[in-house]
């Protein structure tokens, strides 16, 4: 369905990484329908701002996310990215306590 979307490509990439920590940039790009270069740039943005960290595992990369960081929108900074991800189907790891966001 062409046209506008409710979620940005950054949100879609973060959602896929949260759901599949060993997903490749190529798999993400094919799923979302953007170039692999655009996907890598988005992952770098997310990594630079602390939402995503990468760990090398053999020849692959395993991603992890920080679900306690706030959304970037000025009107939504009192909500954690993990809340959005949970709404989109991500399951918080058992035993992980949700940290409150300082306002």
Image (cartoon, rainbow, N blue to C red):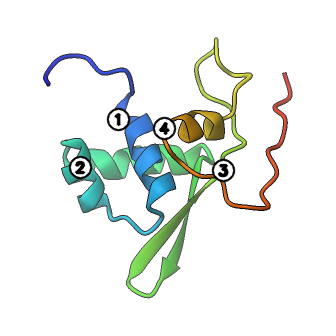
Q: CA distance from mark 1 to mark 3?
A: 18 Å
Which label lies toward us, 2 or 3?
A: 2
Query: Who's the residue at 70% across and 26% down the image?
Result: 79
Is residue 19 or residue 53 the one in the foreground? 19
- The kind of secondary structure element at disc 1 is helix
Tell me how far mark 4 sits from mark 1, CA to CA. 14 Å
Instruction: Name the residue beneath numbered marker 2.
Output: 31
Q: Nearer the viewer, mark 2 or mark 4?
A: 4
Is the residue marked by circle 1 packed among few (<14), some (14-19), or many (20+) residues within 10 Å? some
| Residue drawn 55% across the image and 40% down it | 85
The tag on residue 66 is 3
* Residue 55, quarter of picture: bottom right
Whether residue 63 sits left or right of residue 8 in the image: it is right
Identity of the residue drawn at 23% across and 49% down: 31
Q: Residues within 10 Å of mark 3 (few under 14, many from 20)?
A: some
- Which comes sooner in the sequence, label 2 or label 3? 2
The numbered dot on residue 88 is: 4
Q: Which image quarter is the C terminus in?
A: top right
- Nearer mark to the viewer, of 3 and 4: 4
The disc placed on residue 9 is 1
Label 3 vs label 4: CA separation? 16 Å
Residue 68 position within the rendered picture, expressed as x and y whole percent measured from the top left? 72, 42
Q: Are marks 2 and 4 in contact (CB under 8 Å)?
A: no
Q: Position of residue 102 (x, y in %)?
A: 86, 28
**Disc 2 + disc 1, Cβ < 8 Å:** no
């Amino acid at each position: 369905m062409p046209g506008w979307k409710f979620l940005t490509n950054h949100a879609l990439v973060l959602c896929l990484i949260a759901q599949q920590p060993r997903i490749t940039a190529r798999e993400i790009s094919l799923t979302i329908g953007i170039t692999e270069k655009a996907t890598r740039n988005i992952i770098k943005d997310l990594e630079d701002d602390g939402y995503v960290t990468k760990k090398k595992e053999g020849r692959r990369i395993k991603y992890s996310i920080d679900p306690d960081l706030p959304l970037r929108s000025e009107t939504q900074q009192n909500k954690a990215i993990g809340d959005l991800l949970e709404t989109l189907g991500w399951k918080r790891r058992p035993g992980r306590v949700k940290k409150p966001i300082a306002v």
